[in-house]
Image (cartoon, rainbow, N blue to C red):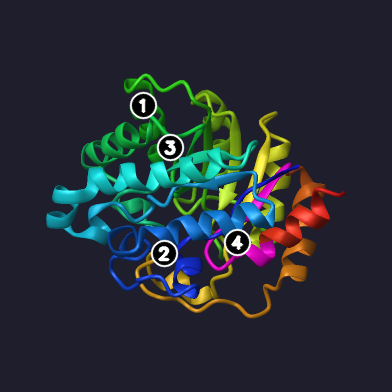
Amino acid sequence: MTVLDGGTGRELARIGAPFSQPLWSAQALIEGPDYVRRVHESYVAAGAEVITTNTYALVPFHLGDELYSRDGARLTALAASIARDVADRHPGVRVAGCLPPVLGSYQPELFVRELARPLLDVLVREQAPFVDLWLAETQSSIAEAELIADVLDAHGQSEPLWLSFTLDDGDDEDHEPRLRSEESVIDAAHAAEELGAEVLLFNCSQPEVMEPAVAVAAGATRLPIGVYANAFVMEIEESAANAGMHNIRDDVTSDSYVALARRWVAAGASIVGGCCGIGPEHVSALSAQLSAG
């Protein structure tokens, strides 16, 4: 069992870091980077074996075109270097270089390969010296994942690719699990294999939709499978992720999250962590209860 960290943006806000829209988690890098270090350290202390760079918001969607053009590359390198420094102080902890959906979360219809590629080029180039693996996360479509694999190949990156898709939260037990693009989880699993991913994950979706996706994926691929769910209330479906400060469910406690994670593990997952709204207390419970069996 491998334990990942939890959400960065919400944890930055919780500990009092500079935080507002539209900058989101990027604001702490600009005004108080030590807060980012504190969040990484808190997850390591909670038992996380992989920490993710705070680069999700380092795109024009959050920074705006002017700030991105001026400081996007520098902030990306800073975020990765902070994570690397924390990991180096804790033997066994690995750094995952975050590669987000650069043109908008939860909105596969906004993806344009020609527009996304130069943004991914910056994220890969600036993080490459610091990461142990690449985490392409919250991918809403197979096309987004295909471009990331292409960019990594173009940059000669040999570090493992962990490919994480976000799921349609509206699915129920009678519906085949699918991505937000409406592509099937089976097709996503096959694509992950074809793209050379070493791990297939599902993230930033409701905890309840993860178990069916894991079960289907486990029957479609031999890749290790991971899950890190969010705690958003369902109103998030009305807009893009991180487009506003969406409410967090109060029923996703540490105990209830571990109970859900046990079901993911039973279905075939061997990697667990948390996304938006899942904090160090959840990760600590995962580490203590799942790692111990």
Relative height, residue 172 to residue 200 (above, below): below
280 part of magenta stretch: yes
Question: Residue drawn at (61%, 42%), measured in percent from left and top?
Answer: 90
Tell me which numbered mark, 4 or 3, is placed earlier along the sequence.
3
The residue carrying pointer 2 sits among few (fewer than 14), some (14 to 19) or many (20 or more) residues within 10 Å by Cα, namely some
Q: Amino acid at mark 1?
A: Asp
Kindly tell me whether residue 252 is visible in this rendering: yes
Q: Where in the figure is residue 201, as x and y percent of width and height? A: 59, 43
Give the Cα distance between marks 2 and 4: 18 Å
Residue corresponding to mark 2:
241
Choose top left, top right, bottom left or bottom right for residue 32.
Answer: bottom left
Asked if the residues shown at circle 2 and circle 1 are in contact, with their CB atoms under 8 angstroms apart, the answer is no
Number of numbered tags placed on the structure image: 4
Relative height, residue 82 to residue 38 (above, below): above
Residue corresponding to mark 1:
150
| Image disc number at residue 145 | 3
